[in-house]
């Protein structure tokens, strides 16, 4: 019996050696990472905004928000999400481990730096931020607003992903162009529990930077019964910079006099 087994094994090895295994030169192939990794509808949304492959080539994003008390400039390393927010009276940073806060004068920061340090980046980097690891996608009911219907993709996070894994988003897109039109989102940072209350942002004003379609203005809406009602306020974004050059990590380090936010 043992001899028969060895004979069969030897024949199998010889057969395998004689087989020609086809090879593919992937350097000559144009690959799209969205093809098999993501659901078809959100892959088309990524494509409508310049494509996930193009986005993934970028190393950093800088944008300016015009606020009543002065401009706020946010710089983010797209690969590790380290960030720096320069405000007229404060600076907030994330060095990859800790969030830090530095006062430029005696004015106290009234917000929560740990909640805020990546908040506007997440809203601004839509829809590409929804390609992160640990995301669960699900089709959901469309949004009907002022006679128009927008199909929806619900986004949830696996346990332990990010500061607020209980957060949920719904991306609503134009069914003809697949461009993003609305974002519904919950806030769970403070409660640490899932919320049934969705807030709404309208994405309708776009600009192209380095062949990537990014928001020019975000419009917040009041809401009732998990539906947007009337416009609340606009937030414009200027001086947008996308770069393939890696940032110096030292810009995210907590400077002397900064406080680590617990």
Image (cartoon, rainbow, N blue to C red):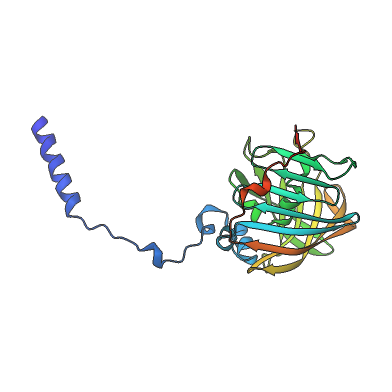
Left or right of 105 in this view: 4: left
Quarter holding residue 165: top right
- Residue 82: give x, y in percent of width and height: 66, 46
Outermost residue on the left side: it is 3
Residue 116 in view here: yes
Q: What residue do we see at 62% from left, 45% from top?
A: 136
Vertical side of 34 occupied by 187: above or below: above
- Residue 49: give x, y in percent of width and height: 65, 65
- Residue 20: give x, y in percent of width and height: 22, 58
- Residue 252: give x, y in percent of width and height: 68, 46
Outermost residue on the top side: it is 1
Vertical side of 56 occupied by 254: above or below: above
Quarter holding residue 25: bottom left
Q: What residue do we see at 56% from left, 53% from top?
A: 38
User: In this view of the protein, which residue sits in the foreground, 153 or 231?
Assistant: 231
Vertical side of 18 occupied by 261: above or below: above
User: In this view of the protein, which residue sits in the foreground, 242 or 166?
Assistant: 242
The C terminus appears in which quarter of the rendering?
Answer: top right
Give the number of marks.
0
Outermost residue on the front side: it is 256
Quarter holding residue 59: bottom right
């Amino acid at each position: 019996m043992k001899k028969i087994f060895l004979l069969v094994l030897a024949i199998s090895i010889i057969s395998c050696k004689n087989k020609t295994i086809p090879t593919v030169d992937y350097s000559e192939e144009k690959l799209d990472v969205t093809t098999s990794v993501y659901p078809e509808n959100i892959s088309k949304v990524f494509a409508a905004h310049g494509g996930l492959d193009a986005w993934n080539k970028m190393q950093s994003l800088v944008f300016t928000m015009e606020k009543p008390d002065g401009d706020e400039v946010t710089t983010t390393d797209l690969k590790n999400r380290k960030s720096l927010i320069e405000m007229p009276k404060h600076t907030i940073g994330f060095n990859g481990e800790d969030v830090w806060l530095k006062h430029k004068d005696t004015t106290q920061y009234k917000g929560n730096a740990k909640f805020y340090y990546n908040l506007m980046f997440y809203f601004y980097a839509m829809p590409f931020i929804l390609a992160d690891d640990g995301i669960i996608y699900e089709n959901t009911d469309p949004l009907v607003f002022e006679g128009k219907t927008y199909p929806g993709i619900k986004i949830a996070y696996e346990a332990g992903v990010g500061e607020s894994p209980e957060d949920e988003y719904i991306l609503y897109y134009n069914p003809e162009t697949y461009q993003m039109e609305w974002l519904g989102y919950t806030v769970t940072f403070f409660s640490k529990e899932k919320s049934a209350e969705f807030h709404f942002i309208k994405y309708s004003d776009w600009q192209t930077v380095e062949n990537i379609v990014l928001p020019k203005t975000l419009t917040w809406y009041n809401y009732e019964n998990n539906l947007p009602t009337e416009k609340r306020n606009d937030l414009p974004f200027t001086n947008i910079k996308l770069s393939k050059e890696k940032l110096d990590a030292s810009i995210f380090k907590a400077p002397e006099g900064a406080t680590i936010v617990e």
